[in-house]
Image (tube, rainbow, N blue to C red):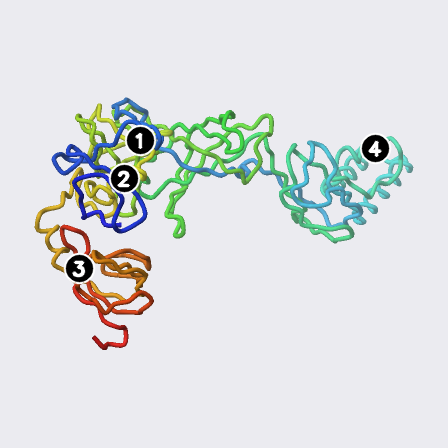
């Protein structure tokens, strides 16, 4: 509660019901950082890691999303005016095999040319007239298979079944049973799944470093063991106003159809050359919002915060551009516990308040003397009175950051404040001295001395 107050021997705290924490001479401000007992380090679960330089592929990590390959999508259209007699595909995103029926189309305009052809054939007309009749039927988009069936069976066919040109899914379905269709109208769109597009979101800061042809290794978030490789085919123009990312597009093989459109992928974009980087574990870097900090271990075993400039992530490691050297040792876990321990000893600055790399803030004599001269006031209830001190249950003291609590304050002399009795509510003032906190004034809460 009072880290600035020091004692020359162990014992019970005069301020709280707890034992004093020993602080040894070599843990003071004689060196940069703080020294923590090895047993305490083990209890805190502190792990260390070495800063190392490594040649890595020029690249970065990103996130991608799978989409249908629109360049391979097939459309099913009507070439004639007709009516949907039966719709086999019931809804969009339905899986379908190559050659499977999509819709049965009734075409009443096919009836007359077929009847004419059969009449010419029954009348024994010459081959030239029959061939002209066949050409007319082809001009009306009657399939050759239906004309051949007409020759064999002699029966008029007015229905045609439109089938899927590829195995995939019905990505669009624009008609329903009984609907009239016109020539050129798209009934459905079939998208294949054997190949997909992967749209990679490139951070704006890395937009200038991305080029077509860069290799991509993508893994599915749900199963990191599955790898899908490819090369960036094109960079899409424009930066997203919401995510501030640039989109790169590539084609990936999906022969087993394990991937579906809309899946989120973890992407590693690789460069064309190797780059030497200084790397630390990503968990060792603490980002405060304005800067990045690591806890480094000095040669004498002391720990201190170091401000660093970080670059790109390389797997589970982060590139360090400034602040560390090859071979330095940093704390990989337990950083915040170290910070708390150091703050209690007034050796390390708070990580958020440190102004420079490896800067310590030892308490100067002027800084210690200033709080001792300050006077603080609050209101409380008298709990116990002795010749040495008075115990109050007092209200918070914002200037010291104290909450409401019960503690004892020393009297300037044994006969001081003789009228103060337990149970009274008083307003009192105190200041810090070498012997703790000494009372300078005690008066009833109403103001009468």
How far apart marks 1 and 3 lie (CA) works out to 43 Å
Q: Residues within 10 Å of mark 4 (few under 14, many from 20)?
A: few
Q: Which residue is mark 4?
A: 149
First in residue order: circle 4 vs circle 3: 4
| Comparing labels 1 and 4, the label whose residue is closer to the camera | 1
Q: Secondary structure at mark 2?
A: helix
Mark 1 / mark 2, whichever is N-terminal? 1
Marks 4/3: CA distance?
Answer: 124 Å
Label 2: how many Cα within 10 Å (few below 14, some 14–19, many 20+)? some
Q: Is the residue 269 above or below the residue 405 in the image?
A: above
Give the image quarter of residue 444: bottom left
Q: What residue do we see at 40% from left, 27% from top?
A: 215
Q: How many marks?
A: 4
Mark 1 and mark 4 lie on one chain; the one further toward the N terminus is 1
- Quadrant for residue 10, please give it: top left
Q: Position of residue 395 (x, y in %)?
A: 31, 63
Q: Are marks 1 and 2 in contact (CB under 8 Å)?
A: yes
Q: Read off the residue under disc 2.
A: 341
In the rendered image, the vertical position of residue 240 relative to residue 281, given as above or below: below
Mark closer to the observer (1, 3): 3
Q: Is residue 320 above or below residue 2?
A: above
- Which one is nearer the viewer's eye here, 422 or 343? 422
Q: Which residue is mark 1?
A: 40
Q: Which residue is drawn at the image coordinates 28% and 67% (left, top)? A: 421
Whichever of labels 1 and 3 marks the residue nearer the N terminus, that label is 1
Q: CA distance from mark 1 to mark 4?
A: 91 Å
């Amino acid at each position: 509660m009072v880290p600035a107050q020091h004692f020359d021997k162990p014992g019970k705290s005069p301020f709280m019901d707890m034992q004093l924490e020993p602080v040894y001479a070599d843990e003071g401000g004689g060196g940069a950082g703080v020294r923590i007992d090895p047993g305490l380090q083990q209890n805190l679960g502190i792990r260390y890691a070495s800063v190392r330089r490594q040649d890595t592929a020029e690249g970065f990590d990103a996130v991608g999303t799978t989409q249908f390959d629109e360049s391979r999508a097939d459309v099913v259209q009507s070439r004639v005016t007709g009516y949907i007699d039966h719709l086999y595909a019931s809804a969009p995103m339905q899986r379908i095999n190559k050659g499977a029926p999509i819709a049965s189309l009734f075409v009443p305009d096919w009836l007359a040319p077929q009847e004419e052809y059969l009449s010419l054939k029954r009348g024994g007309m010459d081959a030239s007239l029959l061939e002209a009749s066949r050409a007319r039927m082809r001009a009306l988009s009657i399939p050759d298979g239906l004309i051949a069936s007409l020759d064999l069976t002699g029966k008029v066919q007015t229905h045609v079944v439109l089938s899927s040109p590829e195995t995939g899914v019905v990505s669009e379905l624009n008609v329903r049973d009984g609907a009239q269709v016109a020539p050129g109208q798209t009934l459905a769109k079939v998208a294949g799944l054997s190949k997909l597009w992967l749209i990679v979101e490139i951070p704006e800061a890395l937009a200038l470093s991305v080029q077509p042809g860069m290799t991509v290794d993508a893994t599915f978030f749900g199963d990191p063991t599955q790898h899908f490789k490819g090369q960036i085919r094109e960079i899409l123009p424009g930066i997203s106003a919401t995510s501030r990312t640039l989109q790169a597009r590539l084609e990936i093989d999906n022969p087993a159809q394990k991937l579906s459109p809309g899946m989120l992928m973890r992407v590693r974009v690789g460069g064309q050359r190797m780059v030497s980087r200084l790397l630390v574990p990503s968990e060792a870097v603490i980002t405060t919002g304005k800067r990045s900090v690591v806890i480094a271990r000095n040669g004498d075993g002391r720990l201190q915060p170091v401000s660093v400039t970080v670059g790109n992530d390389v797997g589970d490691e982060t590139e360090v551009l400034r602040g560390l050297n090859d071979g330095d040792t940093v704390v990989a876990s337990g950083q915040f516990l170290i910070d708390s321990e150091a703050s209690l000893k007034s050796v390390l600055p708070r990580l958020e308040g440190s102004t420079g790399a490896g800067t310590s803030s030892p308490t100067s004599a002027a800084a210690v003397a200033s709080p001792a001269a300050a006077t603080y006031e609050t209101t409380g209830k008298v709990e116990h009175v002795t010749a040495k001190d008075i115990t109050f249950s007092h209200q918070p003291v914002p200037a010291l950051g104290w909450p409401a609590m019960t503690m004892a304050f020393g009297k300037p002399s044994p006969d001081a404040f003789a009228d103060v009795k337990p149970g009274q509510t008083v307003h009192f003032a105190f200041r810090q001295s070498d012997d703790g906190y000494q009372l300078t004034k005690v008066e009833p809460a109403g103001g009468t001395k």
